[in-house]
Amino acid sequence: MAGINKELLVSVGIDVDEAMHRLLNNEELLIRFLKKFPTDGNYKLLKESLEKGDVQVAFRAAHTIKGLCGNLSMNVLKLIVSEQVEYLRAGNLEEAIRVMPRVTAEYEALVEVISTIS
């Protein structure tokens, strides 16, 4: 894998083998999708909607992040966001907010590693 450091991606919770399988072993496609991840506006939307107390918008944003993570095999972030999605689905804003620091930590770690991909 020329353009990606597999060990580094694995260290932030990406199952590279699973992602490559899903993308028919097309490393170029994986790199392209990974590089698009930080430009997706749903993380920002999630933070803002939680701050405003807008459960519906937060739910949609979290659910979208969960799907992106599933498609890219970002399994650690997916697991945390899945928990948040369920709190939001139940209308439990307090618990969804409580999970946000973990979401942020994983998201920022992913974005940092993705920024190193050439």
Image (cartoon, grey):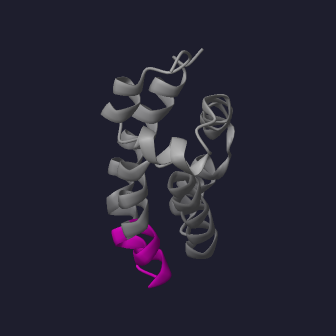
In which quarter of the view is residue 81 placed? bottom left
In which quarter of the view is residue 118 placed? top right
Could you tell me how many numbered marks the image carries?
A: 0
State the extent of the magenta-drawn residues as a range. Answer: 84-95
The picture places residue 113, in percent across and down from the top left corner, at 45, 25
Q: Main secondary structure of the magenta part?
A: helix
Give me the residue at 63% from left, 54% from top: 45
The picture places residue 70, in percent across and down from the top left corner, at 51, 57
23 up-or-down from 112: above or below: below
Depth order, front residue of 106/22: 22
Depth order, front residue of 71/21: 21
Determine whether, in the image, residue 84 is placed left or right of residue 37: left
In which quarter of the view is residue 57 placed? bottom right
Q: Residue furthest bottom?
A: 90
25 up-or-down from 57: above or below: above
Give me the residue at 34% from left, 25% from top: 7
Give me the residue at 36% from left, 68% from top: 83
84 up-or-down from 108: above or below: below
The picture places residue 5, in percent across and down from the top left corner, at 43, 20
Give me the residue at 47% from left, 49% from top: 73
2 up-or-down from 105: above or below: above
Q: Is residue 69 magenta?
A: no
Depth order, front residue of 52/43: 43
The picture places residue 110, in percent across and down from the top left corner, at 45, 34
Determine whether, in the image, residue 54 is placed left or right of residue 111: right
